[in-house]
Image (cartoon, coloured by chain):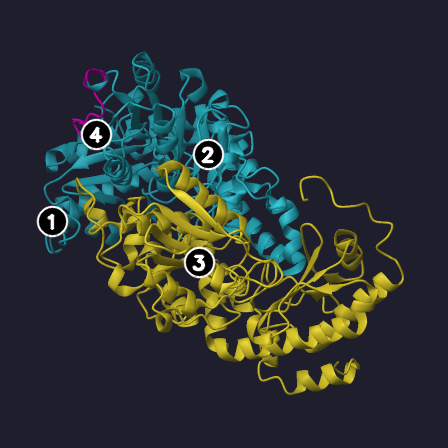
Chain colours: A cyan, B yellow
Amino acid sequence: MGDTHLDRAVRLDRADRLAGYRDRFVIADPALVYLDGNSLGRLPVATRDRLRAVVDTWGTELIGGWDRWIEVNRAAGDVLAGIVGAAAGEVILADSTSVNLYKLACAALAARPGRTVIVTDDDNFPTDRYVLAGIAADRGLTLRMVGTDPDRGIDPAAVTAALDGDVALLCLSHVSYRSGAVADLPALTAAAHEVGALVLWDLCHSAGAVPVGLAAAGADLAVGCTYKYLNGGPGAPAFLYVRADLQTVVRQPIWGWFGQSGQFAMGPSYDPLPDIRRFLVGTPPVLAAYAALEGARLTAEAGVEAIAAKGRALTGYAVDLVDAWLAPLGFRLASPRDPCRRGAHVTLHHPQAWQVCQALKAAGVIPDFRAPDRLRLGMAPLYTRFVDVHSGLSRLRDVVGAGAHEPYPSVPAGIT
Amino acid sequence: MGDTHLDRAVRLDRADRLAGYRDRFVIADPALVYLDGNSLGRLPVATRDRLRAVVDTWGTELIGGWDRWIEVNRAAGDVLAGIVGAAAGEVILADSTSVNLYKLACAALAARPGRTVIVTDDDNFPTDRYVLAGIAADRGLTLRMVGTDPDRGIDPAAVTAALDGDVALLCLSHVSYRSGAVADLPALTAAAHEVGALVLWDLCHSAGAVPVGLAAAGADLAVGCTYKYLNGGPGAPAFLYVRADLQTVVRQPIWGWFGQSGQFAMGPSYDPLPDIRRFLVGTPPVLAAYAALEGARLTAEAGVEAIAAKGRALTGYAVDLVDAWLAPLGFRLASPRDPCRRGAHVTLHHPQAWQVCQALKAAGVIPDFRAPDRLRLGMAPLYTRFVDVHSGLSRLRDVVGAGAHEPYPSVPAGIT
């Protein structure tokens, strides 16, 4: 059990090579402890400035702004490629994660004709499960669900047991949205390839938090959002990855004009571009795309390895405080204990997690609730300090120790 | 042939009830004649202010901002519903036009099982033709193309002749992107219904320019963009319409979490909301969505009938000047002469349209080029004055009269 004195947090912050990045974000209320960067990242100062500039460009250059805007999806994609361990030209900003998941899952199925099974796990993020279920229903395919312990993350043996020659596609999240558990991306990619299936990774909770290493693992396809650890803003456009050699092999189902060769020739038939842009569909939301670009740049500048190292240190420190302060109050760790198996958030079980969440917000700490009994604490390494973890968890201890959560009403219907 | 003196334009501007709306937009360069609002509308002052406020909310309220942001798609949809002649709850802001077209076309096909034909016209906007071709290819259906004269617009008799009991879906644009010709939406909707087909209208070039009257016509489905006459900003999110009684009958193929009942319960299976929100997919781009909302509000405030009346007057005035000044210089009208059959843009043929377009930009007038030989002149009624039309067309006359376009290189490969 570690040292719980504030001094330790102060020492860790002093030694933190990324400490300066906090000043790159708008910190409107310095007293607020924000532990939900895994839901919505903070506003970078550069993004605020960039958005003003893009709006001004719209006002002054009007349609002429498109001479530059047309490049934003690819420019952001190239920055994101570096963050997820891919090469420039393998990633592009586009649509939402859900739409991208649909496009790439359909593309994978078309590339494996005759195979009738999609494999995912029952703890995968809801939109992933729903999108895959919709595709399976539409095409008369089987969606095979692997059972996953929501506190421990994906069991590679269970996934491997679900893979056979009928499987067209394995679709999994790299980091679990509930536990923060990291899946073994290289081993699971290899297992899918072993049976001739393609693999599609959801990187929403890992991009910008842990190294992904798509190229090193030979991963086929991936999607992810930019509004969590990448600080791209609320609902910022998502990204998708298609390994270079697959780009002209697989074909996505939504044949939009932004994927067309000679887009402005407006010719009679669809002839997709021979590169990652063929996975674009319609006109991109330029304002939101520039916010995503600026956010990604900040992560790329800091470096994913340094971010991940700090993430392990922050979550490890949090686990020490949980053990010392919170376990005696009825909290139980709902994340892997091994720091190398965690993303940048730590989840706790508590029978009154909803009420605790409300009381904690009232005490100036923003956590996140996940049904039915989980409190998620996100520690975004670019701006979360060790003193924030100390402050957040000591307030949590004080709130629950004093029973300040008890008066709050229980979790509303529709959330459980 | 009308009066070509500037006095006439000045008189028309003085009598214009919408004249005050020009001040609601950022006019960075008062000398610039902007005739491309049909590609990208101008920046409303309210939008610039709103975007700063939304960015501030992100910075200060962080995840708490979603308590309000979650409503933006529906709030914008209700404003847009009034603009296209639908009821509140029948329209929602979502994704891009292309993605929405895909979703609703697939939904229509699923609602007409056994029918094997999609009908559109060969002059429809490229992304519409491509998206439909992709769906047809994927599902082994026939895409039946009706021939359309690109200067005159859709021939109702030709469309009707293409409709039979095999047709699941008729998909057309209300206003042609090239000629600006208005299709007879009520008659064509009725013709589709006559054979038991559903109809899907693309309103990109009509929403905010002419009355659409979806409900009055009993139209089934529609999509449209918000970045042209609705001034929503570059790549602003699109909208979709599903008639109220169809909303729980048709089902779209991309089962994302924003369409889910009890989204944050994150339950095991997809159970779509019983209203227009079931046509949402992923997390909406909040910044871009608020820009779309503000733009739509301005149009709703001014009123579509008043806007359309001014649009007919502006384009009618432009046609007078074309007849007087430009016909002798080799220009030929590529839009309907009847003002009631035009949207808010006028298109001209010229054998050197590309070069003319470049020379005109150099002369401070922004038109738009469409392959192979068309110059499009958009007259957005909320901010285009009659004196702008006079100034733009007189500069066009002077440029071509002096041969100032001749030195420009011919149209680059990739555009023809």
Mark 4 and mark 1 residues within 8 Å of each other at the beta carbon: no
Residue under circle 2? Answer: A19
Question: Measured from the top left, where is residue A415 in percent x and y?
Answer: 17, 49
Tag in front: 4 or 2: 4
C-alpha separation, residue under disc 4 versus residue under disc 2: 48 Å
Mark 3 and mark 2 residues within 8 Å of each other at the beta carbon: no
Can see residue A301?
no
Which chain does the residue under circle 1 lie in? Answer: A
What amino acid is at disc 2? Ala
Residue under circle 1? Answer: A403
- Asked if both marks, 4 and 2, belong to the same chain, the answer given is yes
Which chain does the residue under circle 4 lie in? Answer: A
Question: Which span is picked out in magenta?
Answer: A145-161
What amino acid is at disc 1? Gly
Front-most of residues A113 and B30: A113
Question: Considering only vertical position in the picture, is B279 above or below A39?
Answer: below
Give the crowd class for mark 4: few <14, some 14-19, many >=20 residues within 10 Å: some
Residue under circle 3? Answer: B161
C-alpha separation, residue under disc 3 versus residue under disc 2: 70 Å
Which chain does the residue under circle 2 lie in? Answer: A
Front-most of residues B194 and A3: B194
Mark 2: which secondary structure?
Answer: helix
